[in-house]
């Protein structure tokens, strides 16, 4: 089954997401009290091929199984690609790689922001040379089969997370998170609040470090919420 791609997420949202990263977005889900498994985080095993890879884009989804990468080819060449992240539900299949650097290179020049697969890839060195963001469970040199058309742009489950075409997909060195489209603005607001708090904490840590280095007067470094919780528990 093939469906049209969902509309791209507005650039004003993508630009904000690029400044936050996966951890802060997951904190934003928690802070907004949105009920998502693992706050939208995919399984810890799904990691970038190389640390430092970053991707932010709109979800295009693929469903396949048994190491069959024909659906991935179908998705690559039969739809607009600019600005999308291809998210592939490969059912965690271990015995074959779903794709290697040939598909990666094609998807890169077609305009994809990256690829995520609940499964395995190959051609790690070639992927690193391309500098194209790819997230997977690891590496398997045994190549894929090409058999069934699968499903393109239907709701899938990838790495323990439900992904609907049009969702926000963000990946960095910590892993991958998916934010449902209807919650994007709310999550960004809360994540930016958390970023402001972290900036304040980093400034306090830097002041403490400098005071300690120069033999100055040290101050209470613990955040106020820690002190409040201790008082409550000890009260």
Image (cartoon, grey):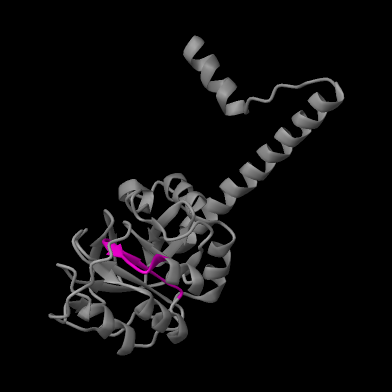
Residue depicted at x 22% and y 58%? 92
Residue depicted at x 32% and y 60%? 139
In the image, residue 33 sits, relative to residue 209, either above or below, namely below
Q: Nearer the viewer, residue 182 or 56?
A: 56
Q: Quadrant of the N terminus?
A: bottom left
Residue depicted at x 23% and y 67%? 142
Q: Where is residue 188 shown, x and y percent of the image? A: 51, 58
Q: Given the current orientation, which residue lies at the most extreme bottom position?
A: 78
Q: Is residue 121 left or right of residue 183?
A: left
Question: Which region of the structure is painted magenta?
Answer: 113-124
Say whether residue 131 is visible. no
Task: Give yes or no for residue 115 being in the magenta stretch.
Answer: yes
Q: Nearer the viewer, residue 31 or 48?
A: 48
Res 211 quadrant in image: top right
Q: Nearer the viewer, residue 37 or 171?
A: 171
Task: Give yes or no for residue 123 being in the magenta stretch.
Answer: yes
Q: Is residue 106 left or right of residue 15?
A: left
Q: Where is residue 98 shown, x and y percent of the image? A: 26, 70
In the image, residue 177 sits, relative to residue 205, either above or below, namely below
Residue depicted at x 28% and y 65%? 141
């Amino acid at each position: 089954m093939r469906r049209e791609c969902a509309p791209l997420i507005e650039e004003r949202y993508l630009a904000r997401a690029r400044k936050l990263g996966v951890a802060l977005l997951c904190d934003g889900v928690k802070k907004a009290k949105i009920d998502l498994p693992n706050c939208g985080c995919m399984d810890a095993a799904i990691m970038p091929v190389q640390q430092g890879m970053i991707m932010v884009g709109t979800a295009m989804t693929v469903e396949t199984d048994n190491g069959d990468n024909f659906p991935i080819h179908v998705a690559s060449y039969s739809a607009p690609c600019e600005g999308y992240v291809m998210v592939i539900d490969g059912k965690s299949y271990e015995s074959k790689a779903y794709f290697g650097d040939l598909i990666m290179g094609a998807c890169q020049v077609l305009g994809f922001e990256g690829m995520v697969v609940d499964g395995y890839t190959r051609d790690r060195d070639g992927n690193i040379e391309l500098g194209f963001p790819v997230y997977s469970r690891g590496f398997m040199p045994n190549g894929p089969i090409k058999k069934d058309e699968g499903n393109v742009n239907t709701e899938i489950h990838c790495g323990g997370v439900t992904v609907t075409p049009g969702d926000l997909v963000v990946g960095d060195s910590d892993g991958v998170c998916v934010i449902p489209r209807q919650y994007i603005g709310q999550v960004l607001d809360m994540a930016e609040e958390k970023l402001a708090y972290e900036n304040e904490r980093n400034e306090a840590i830097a002041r403490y470090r400098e005071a300690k280095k120069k033999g100055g007067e040290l101050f209470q470094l613990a955040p106020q919420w820690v002190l409040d919780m201790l008082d409550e528990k000890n009260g």
